[in-house]
Amino acid sequence: MRFFITGGAGFIGSHLSERLIANGAEVMAIDNFDPYYDPAVKRRNIEGLLSAGGFSLAEADIRDRTAIEKKMEEFSPDVIVHLAARAGIRPSLLDPVLYQDVNMVGTNVLLEVSRQMGIKNFVFASSSSIYGNCGNVPFSEDDHSATPISPYGATKRGGEVLCETYRILYDMKIACLRFFTVYGPRQRPDMAIHKFTRLIDRGDSIEVYASDNSARDYTYIDDILQGICGSIDFVCKKKTPAFEVVNLGESRTVQLNELIGLIEKNLGKRAKRIEKPRQPGDVLTTCANIDKARRLFGYDPKTSIEEGIEKFVEWYKKSR
């Protein structure tokens, strides 16, 4: 099969490309190497892929319809896996219009070009941020009380609505995957686990927001890949139009102080902490109900936070 993966040089995209190619697929990765973080990090992510058979890289912006049309026509994919996005909750409060432009317009371009080319199989990376401070924990996909509290979360919810519209109008088969704080080797350097590990290792202070009541459902990259591959099988095997929104998490909530303790243990160093209040857009807790993912995709996450942090820190020490 042939996969068109947006954000293909990023953390999740590069891992997914490796997994698919190892299984005999062909991949075209699309990435614009946006300077949100150092583009050299992304280029290192795909160094091994560039010499692998079955992999090609196209540098393009998902908002550029002409470029996307050209690349899709050249490659003729069977499946679109749309991972590209302007990421980050707090930065989205500083430039919400940019987030709307990249995340909404970019998603619409991909859906429209897919429709135009008759590509029916589409996987969209959504986010647990769409739940906001939902009071019903664990979070379930059919909870209508969920309300995003950041522009980033709002754009991800908007992307889901666009996907459902295209299923209704054009008989597409679409899975929207709500990722819950994905981590592991090659995680984005701005994300908490990577950032805390780097700063603690250097002896620098870490800023800790609402440490007494902040908790997250952390999902290891191998488990997310299993969920994505399960969603691909799901959409490809469906004989009729489909639209599903599905949580992909570990379904375990980890307190922030516990997370920092695990990083300290694996580094053998103590953190210097600067306590800060909760910031606008930050949610208190995330926790995924993964019953639907188990039922539809055979999803079965295996990696505990203890094992995952040990693996991450081991990778970090080798790569620093």
Image (cartoon, grey):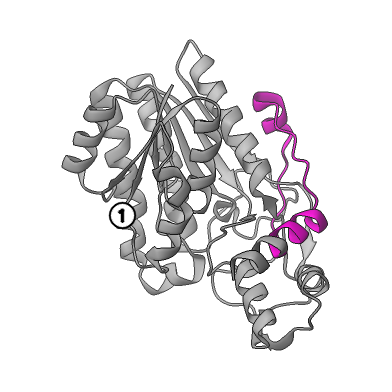
Circle count: 1
Percent of width and height locating residue 2: 40, 25
Q: Residue at x 55, y 31 (%)?
A: 22
**Amino acid type of the residue tagged 1 in the rendering:** Asn
Task: Using the image as rendered, state which of residue 291 and residue 220 is in the foreground.
Answer: 220
Quarter assignment of residue 264 = bottom right
Residue 295 within the segment the image draws in magenta: yes
Where is residue 33 shown, x and y percent of the image? 34, 58
Task: Choose top left, top right, bottom left or bottom right for residue 28.
Answer: top left
Q: Is residue 208 above or below residue 40?
A: below
Q: Residues within 10 Å of mark 1 (few under 14, many from 20)?
A: some
Residue 206 seen in this snapshot: yes
Q: Is residue 277 visible?
A: no
Q: Residue at x 64, y 78 (%)?
A: 278
Does residue 258 belong to the magenta stretch? Answer: no
Q: Which residue is mark 1?
A: 32
- Kindly state the secondary structure of the residue where label 1 is placed: loop
Farthest-out residue, left? 66
| Left or right placement of residue 46 versus residue 318 in this view | left
In the image, which residues are magenta?
Answer: 285-313
The quadrant where residue 279 appears: bottom right
Q: Residue at x 59, y 47 (%)?
A: 179
The x, y position of residue 18, in whole percent, is: 52, 39
Residue 302 locus on image (x, y percent) = 78, 41
Determine whether, in the image, residue 8 is placed left or right of residue 206. left
Query: Which residue in the rendered view is the most extreme toward the front?
Result: 51
Task: Locate residue 116 relative to residue 319 in the image: left or right.
Answer: left
Given residues 19 and 5, the one toward you in this image is 19
Residue that appears at 44% across and 21% down: 1
Quarter of the picture holding the C terminus: bottom right
Q: Nearer the viewer, residue 146 or 309?
A: 309
